[in-house]
Image: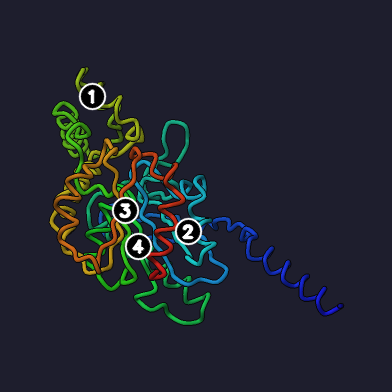
Amino acid sequence: MFLKLLASALLILCVATANAEPPRIEPESIFWNSTFRGPGNGETMHGALYRAHVPRKWALYFTGLSTDCTMLHRTGIGNFLAQRGLTLLCYDRRGAGQSRQNDLPEDTEGRPRPGHADSVEQLMHDAKDAHLQLQQIAMRHTGKWPLPADILGIGESFGGKVIIPFAHRHPGFLAGGVVLLSPAIYTRPEAVPPLSVRLSILSHHFFGRIIGRRMFTSAITLPMLTDSSDGLEWASRNPYLTREFTPEFFMVARALDKLTVEQATHLKQRLLVVTSLADLVIDAQKIRDTVLPAYSPSQLRHIAVDCQHLALWGESSAHIAQSIVDFALGH
């Protein structure tokens, strides 16, 4: 009788343990100095690290244009992935979150100015530094250097525009796979800045060069300088560009456009691509028509969702996050 009661109690305990929510994993802030040498060096980079209790894979997260590391905490995605065995390092791109450029002056309120990438090489080098940080974290945790297949990359929106040339240039760095979440390979025509905004960007760029001073502005204030009605109307539809950028950064983004389109169909890694036809920023249909057919079914996994660009981690988040876990673990 006693043994039956004991067995029943153990069975109930096992079921309760299996159904219990894993302990929440909070992000750790880490900082490192950029090793980039050239114009715009001296950057202090920041990342948010989600440590899995029992890591099965290691992931590097490339954020979107208007977001930073806090996005993964707000949405709970960092915690979700780490609870399921992915140790995740999300790093703040230059000019986002807590990544700063040390040689820039403070703004009018005494706050440090964010840094901004002046070249594609800076962005590629910063991603390489973040990848090295993740490797060192894995080394300290396991006592051995991680295998190339143990590391994957996740690029969201503009982060997809960065991760594609990075993965193409260093195929062995993200041999575990590449996840593209509404990647900014093609932009919908209505999301492209009108001529007045592009001319304002160019004029700021050359004016800053003439006076030898780094200029700061945003896509919202640029059309106001020219009193452009079409520019103001476009800016009202694109509130995600309210942050300040240097005009040089817009030039870098244009250079990335060319690289991304050229290399999006030539990646060697396994791919998980998430697109939405309801996206008003990214041309998902063009991605489906031109990029996805370049890959075999054994290399590519595609997920179609129905949400706006900035709502990617909304109602579809659980489905997308679980798909990332399954992809990372080879399910």
Q: Nearer the viewer, residue 37 or 286?
A: 286
What colouring does the structure picture have?
Answer: rainbow
Instruction: Measuring from the top left, give residue 270's x and y in whole percent.
Output: 28, 67
Look at label 1 and name its amino acid: Pro
Identify residue for label 4. Answer: 153
Instruction: Tell me the distance, in whole angstroms, between the alpha carbons under discs 4 and 2.
Output: 20 Å
| Foreground disc of the pair 3, 4 | 3
- Mark linked to residue 303: 3
Identify residue for label 1. Answer: 223
- Going from N to C along the chain, the mark reached first, 1 or 4, is 4
| Foreground disc of the pair 3, 1 | 3
Look at label 2 and name its amino acid: Phe
The secondary structure type at the circle numbered 3 is: strand
Q: Residues within 10 Å of mark 2 (few under 14, many from 20)?
A: some
Q: Nearer the viewer, residue 47 or 313?
A: 313
- Going from N to C along the chain, the mark reached first, 1 or 2, is 2
| Foreground disc of the pair 1, 4 | 4
Q: Residues within 10 Å of mark 4 (few under 14, many from 20)?
A: many
Quadrant of the image containing the C terminus? bottom left
Q: Tell me the quarter of the picture where residue 52 sits.
A: bottom right
| Foreground disc of the pair 2, 3 | 3
Instruction: Measuring from the top left, give residue 297's x and y in whole percent.
Output: 23, 65
